[in-house]
Amino acid sequence: MAVVKESLIDALREHFGFDSFKGNQEIIIKSILAGKDTFVIMPTGGGKSLCYQLPALMSPGCALIVSPLIALMKNQVDLVRSYSSKDNVAHFLNSTLSKAQIKKVRTDLLSGKTKMLYVAPETLTKQENLDFFRELEISFIAVDEAHCISEWGHDFRPEYRRLKEMIEQINDQLPIIALTATATPKVQSDIVKNLGLRDPEIYLSSFNRSNLYYEIRPKRKKEQTIREIVKFIHLHKGKSGIIYTLNRKTTEELADMLVANNIKAVAYHAGLDAGTRAQRQDMFLHEDVDVIVATIAFGMGIDKPDVRFVIHYNIPKSLENYYQETGRAGRDGLEGICVCFYSYKDVQKLEHLMRDKPLSEREMGAQLINETVAYAESSACRRKVILHYFGEKYEESQCNNACDNCRNPKEKIEVKNRVVVVLKA
Ligand code: ADP
Ligand code: MG
Ligand code: ZN
């Protein structure tokens, strides 16, 4: 096996210029190269892409990579190309391409030069594409962001549910690699079931983010909360931070209040036109502003390594969301402070948002909300609660006082009328 190991490292150096594998990358790559169905669960920033990119470069044929966001697909392909001397090593195929571009992609695929083809799920719903892929040599299928398949995930996309049948139309023997940063057991079993993974090799990395400090603060009157936030930001002057709020209007209000307090801040939400959104995102990335006050529309695919704090002005709708959103702090491994304001009123607001949804969805939503409430009200180590939620064993002695409950053991935050969401059809 030493030979294999050496050649893998050589291939890593040759193709990416890295000297060593991160975490489970090497063993995952071996599993993929052995043609096994493989399930990779690794936190954001862990290095999932390389797990399929390297085997794709080392295998005969072309790998198909399913990716949910058209906007991110181009970045991914550009990144792969930047490691290679040949532009046709990777392509994407989606609805943004012109006829001529599609023809070029197909020619490169047929010539065998292309090792990775990124596709949107929609691409696989087109029969002509499936017919075309059937004639190609495909090395394996990678399903990135595989949690999109599950309603229990934080980003459900119904098209993902049809992937299995579409893949089978291409070739029902193809190895499937599923990758996600979502570790809840429910989402995991949905992925294995829906993609029909055959006796998969499962690689679960730790989700502990030891450099993040978690804190819950009771939310009182609006003015007081804003004063607390202003004070916090002044204490961390010049540092980058994200404030998440539940609705669009609040992002604007809060950003205005911060600006009035000499803090460089902008609001960001899906109601702004694309140009304004891109401009504000750049202002944050280039540090023309320190703070971005945003709805959850902000963050997916944004890689600013030195975000020093994430404040939740409202409690998020699931612990999964909380983990993903706070996970944007401290990507560089340095300090990240995560403060969440919690009140019963905000829980009611979350419930209210679900009022027109079908009963099954409301039940699911209510369960997720109750789990975040339990987290907020817990007097146990925050990290332990989060990691247990992801099915990971963790003892609070490992926390090193990096959460409010470990640092200052205190009484529970008592919220009147402890929430049990009552659902009526
Ligand atoms: P994920 O998809 O898990 O969020 P990415 O695949 O985007 O993570 O990788 C995160 C970062 O880690 C990227 O900048 C990537 O270049 C880097 N990276 C991945 N593998 C290695 C490695 N073996 N050595 C050094 N850097 C790596
Ligand atoms: Mg990724
Ligand atoms: Zn703790």
Image (cartoon, helix red, strand yellow):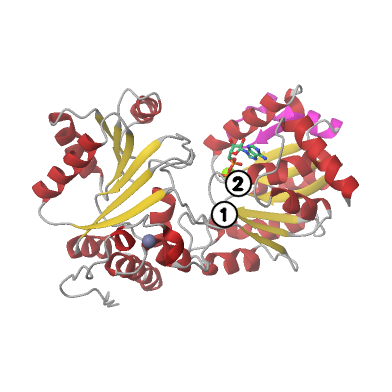
**Residue 373: x, y in percent?**
30, 67
Placement of the C terminus among the 4 image quadrants: bottom left
Point out the stretch of residues depicted in magenta. Answer: 89-111
Check disc 2: other Cα within 10 Å, few if <14, some if 14-19, many if 20+. Answer: some
Q: Looking at numbered disc 2 in the image, what kind of residue is underneath it?
A: Glu
Residue located 27% across and 78% down the image: 424
Residue 148 appears at what percent x and percent y?
54, 55
Q: Is mark 1 within 8 Å of ligand 2?
A: no
Image height check: is 105 above or below 356? above
Dominant secondary structure of the magenta stretch? helix
Q: Is residue 24 left or right of residue 305?
A: right
At x 27% / y 51%, what residue is drawn? 246
- The residue drawn where x is 70% and y is 46% is 51
> Secondary structure beneath disc 2?
helix
Task: Specify whether 18 is left or right of 410.
Answer: right
Dividing the image into four equal quarters, which quarter contains ligand 1? top right
Q: Nearer the viewer, residue 317 or 217?
A: 217
Judging by the rendered image, the residue that carries numbered circle 1 is: 159
Nearest the eye: 233 or 276: 233
Residue at the image point whose x is 66% and y is 36% from the top: 93
Mark 2 vs mark 1, CA separation in Å: 7 Å
Q: Is residue 93 magenta?
A: yes
Q: Is residue 383 above or below residue 367?
A: above
The disc labelled 1 sits on which kind of residue?
Glu
Q: Give the residue at mark 2.
A: 122
